[in-house]
Amino acid sequence: MQTKLFIDGEFVDAADGATFETIDPHDGSVLANVAEAREEDIDRAVEAAGRAFPAWRDVPAADRGRLLLKLADAIESDAGNLAALETRDTGHPVRDTLGLDVPRTAATFRYFGGMADKFQGSVVPVEQGFLNYVVPEPLGVIGQIVPWNFPVMFTSWKLGPALAAGNCVVMKPSEITPLSALRVAELAAEVGFPPGVINMVPGFGTTAGQRIVDHPGIAKVSFTGSTNVGKMIARGAAETLKQVHLELGGKGANLVFEDANIPAAVNGTAFGIFHNQGQACIAASRLIIHEAVADEFLERLIALARSIRLGDPKQETTEMGPLTSALHRDRVASYLELAGQEGGEVLTGGAVPVDPSLADGFYVEPTIVQTRPGTRTAQEEVFGPFMVVHKFKTDEEALQIANDVAYGLGGGLWTNDLSRGHRVARELRAGMVWVNSYKRVNPGSPFGGIGISGYGREMGFEAMREYTEPKSTWINVDAPPKPFYPR
C-alpha cells in the first residue's frame, strides 16, 4: 500500500508533511494516513511533467503504446491486490472490483495502448500545387481530477488516452479513495514509464484541485465529479484559457414499455441502480414504467431489491457494500427524509440496515420510492441506492418525463418493438442510450453527456481528440507564384 505522493518518478512526502486519513467504509476504521498534496506539491508535479513532456512527446507512438500494454499486463497480474485495495477503500464488493473494475481498468489501458500508433492525421484536398496535412499534437501537461466512486477504473479512463496521445499528467485522486490510483502509479514506474510522465497527487479539491485549475503550466483539466464543482472548474479555468473536459452528474431515465421482457428488464434495472450502491453517474435512478405492466414489474423488482445481500465488501458473497463515506451516507439519508416530505411512497428500503455487524459502517438499504416527476427527489442526483418510480400511458408521455430533467448523461429503454427502440433512443436527451440493457461500457465507445452532465467524452477515438489539437501544415510543392501586389 503506497501512501506518499508520486512526483517525478518517486514516492515522496508532501512538502509540509501534511497527511489525511483514508477510511474503511465497512467499519469506519482508519486504513492509512496518506500524504496530502497542497499548492507547493502541485507546482512540483507540474514542473516535473513539464520537463518530461518534450521527450515523452517525441517517443514513437508505438513505444508509448507498448508501455501502456505492459501496464495493462501488470494490472492483470496484480488484480488480487488492486481489487482488495479498491474494496477496502471504496466499499465496493470484492466480487465487483475483481470481476469488473480491475479487468475494465486493464482493458482500457490495453485499448489505448493499441490506439497510440493508430490515431492518425489527414491530408486535405486543397488547390493544385499545395500539400496540406493535419496532424494531432499532444497538448502538454494535463491536469486530471478523479472521483471516488470507481477510482481505479477512472484512473485508466483518463490516463490511457492522455498518455497514448503523448501528454504528461498530473492526476489528483479523491482524498476519499486514493489508494488504488497510487498503486497504478507504482505499477507504471515498474514497467518503465519515464519519471515525470505520470504524477499522482492525492489531496483536497479546495487546495490541490484548485491549484490544478489555476496553474498556468497546465494545458487542460479533465474532471469527473459533481455538476456544482464542474461549474466552478469551468469558471476558474477561464482565467488561463485552459481547455476543460467535464464528466458530471446524471439522473438516468430507465423506460419500461408494455412489451418488454419483464424478467430481463427487472434484472437490468436492478443492476442499473444498485450496482456499486448506486454510486454511479449513469445509474438508472428514474424508473419510468408503463402502467399496464407496473404492478408485476414492481413486485418482481421489490422482491429482488429485498434479496440483495448487504455485508462486508471483502466477503465474496456480498452483493452490496456500504456507501463510500459517512458524509455521503448522510446525504443519501437526507433524500429519504425529503421523499416523505414531498409525499412520496417508499415501496421498499428507506432505512439503515438493522444488522448489528453493519452498525459501524456507512450502509443504506436498496430503496425504491414512487413519486411525482417534478419533485426534488425526481430531479436531483442522489447518487445512492435510491430509485424513483413514475408511471406512464403513452410513448409521448414517457419521453416527456424522461427528458424533463437538466441532466443528460445516460438513459435506457426496454421493448421488443425494434422501431420503437430506435425512435425512443433518438428522442432521449442523453449522451448514451441502452436498448434492452443498461450501464454497458467499453473502451471503444464514447462516454459523456449533455446539459448539466458536462461536455467532452471519455474513451474511444473521441478521448484521443480530447487530449490533442490539430495542427494544419501547408507545403507549396509546385504552385506557381501569384503576387498579391503585382508591380
Image (cartoon, rainbow, N blue to C red):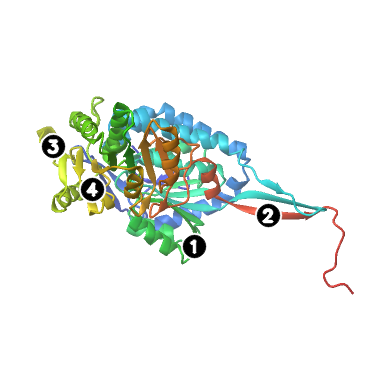
Which is more N-terminal, label 2 or label 1?
Answer: 1
Q: Residue at x 18, y 40 (%)?
A: 364
On screen, residue 136 versus residue 112, left or right, reads: right
Per the image, the residue denoted by label 2 is 472
Nearer-the-camera pick, 307 or 476: 307
Mark 2 and mark 4: Cα distance apart in space: 48 Å
Circle 1 packing at 10 Å, graded few (<14), some (14-19), many (20+), is some
Per the image, the residue denoted by label 4 is 328
Q: Residue at x 62, y 49 (%)?
A: 136
Q: Is residue 39 above or below residue 300?
A: below
**Quarter holding residue 74:** top left
Number of the front mark, 1 or 4: 4
Number of the front mark, 1 or 2: 2
Per the image, the residue denoted by label 3 is 353
Per the image, the residue denoted by label 1 is 216
Nearer-the-camera pick, 9 or 50: 50
